[in-house]
Amino acid sequence: MKKTTIIFVLLFTFSVFVYSKDLEFPMGYLSGSIMNPSIRIENKGIDGKTGYDKTLKMITGNSDGTCIAIQGINFGKEYYGTYKSVLIEYIAEEGSTSGSIDFSIDHSAYVIASVPLTAQPGGDELQTAEMVFNVNLTGSHKLYVRWNHSKAFLKTIVLKENTPLAVVKPVRTTSLFEQTASSADLPKITGKHRLLMVWKKQTANVSAVSLRSTKTNLQNQLASTDNIWMETSPDGVFIRSGEPLSHLSIYSVTGILYYQRSMEESQIYVPLEKGIYLASAKISSGQLIREKIVIF
């Protein structure tokens, strides 16, 4: 069976992606002379004054309960969806210090994103705010936009494209193969997140995924010692070194050679079945490390 091992090196900084497929809905149409025909005012709020201002090119006069709808948005066919978040451009009137603009689909009352608003002194400064969808949206839906205890003027709604942190293009191989993906210059990623792997027009079998720390910290840590680190997982071992590994051998406890490879790499993943093994790793300086590996 053909297998491809993909090792993701997720740094705290990543490449900046160009969001070329964002879906933008300005409130104005034909240079702002009329309201965007794909947008419909469903509810004028408790004050009953919601309407389109062609001078400001914004929906104004809003109050608690104001609701607009955007017709037939295609969120994609694949299960993870095309869009990850919604961004709005708005003006919060002075005194409107709280509230949010909430998003839901079709006639559901479930809020898929709630964008908190902030008022500015004078109430005439255009601001932006963004919120990630709390569900993966697919298929075609009507998007409802509701004002929750807010009177903010709305200028633009943008659905932000769901872009990957890293992309790996597997190569065709007849044996287990390692591939590393890394990027730079994206904002920091902190907290707890779900990692989603998506196969795009290929059927590679993935044996393991390894997530590494920041590049700078990892390099400093490895450069400070000549030791070799062996980290086990339920189905293999990840080996890394401050210097390039020159040779690696893994034996069963009965002395049968299970894996052997000469190389010039500082890290490698070896898939192993459950059991006890003896690993012998040699680095370019000549240092030899022998370790017992237990996979359970």
Image (cartoon, rainbow, N blue to C red):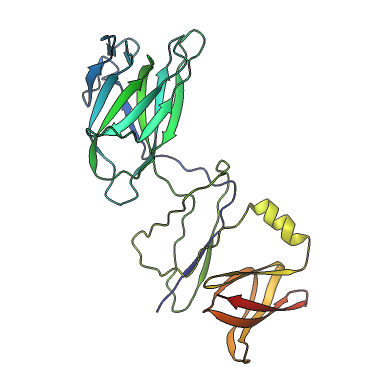
**Which one is nearer the viewer's eye here, 141 or 295?**
295
Q: Please identify the quarter of the rendering in which residue 157 is found.
A: top left
**Which one is nearer the viewer's eye here, 222 or 112?**
112
The relative height of residue 96 versus residue 260 in the rendered view (above or below) is above
Q: Please identify the quarter of the rendering in which residue 25 is found.
A: top left
Say left or right for 248 vs 143. right
Residue 249 in sight: no
Q: Where residue 99 sits in the image (x, y, percent)?
A: 42, 20
Quadrant, the C terminus: bottom right
At a point 37% along the width and 14% down the height, the residue shown is 151
Q: Where residue 12 sits in the image (x, y, percent)?
A: 60, 47
Q: Where residue 234 sits in the image (x, y, percent)?
A: 53, 71
The relative height of residue 255 versus residue 16 in the rendered view (above or below) is below
Q: Where residue 241 sits in the image (x, y, percent)?
A: 70, 68
At a point 31% along the width and 43% down the height, the residue shown is 137
Please tell me how many numbered marks the rendered image carries. Answer: 0
**Which one is nearer the viewer's eye here, 148 or 161?**
148
Quadrant, the N terminus: bottom left
The relative height of residue 212 versus residue 150 in the rendered view (above or below) is below
The relative height of residue 168 versus residue 256 in the rendered view (above or below) is above
Residue 24 in sight: yes
At a point 56% along the width and 53% down the height, the residue shown is 10
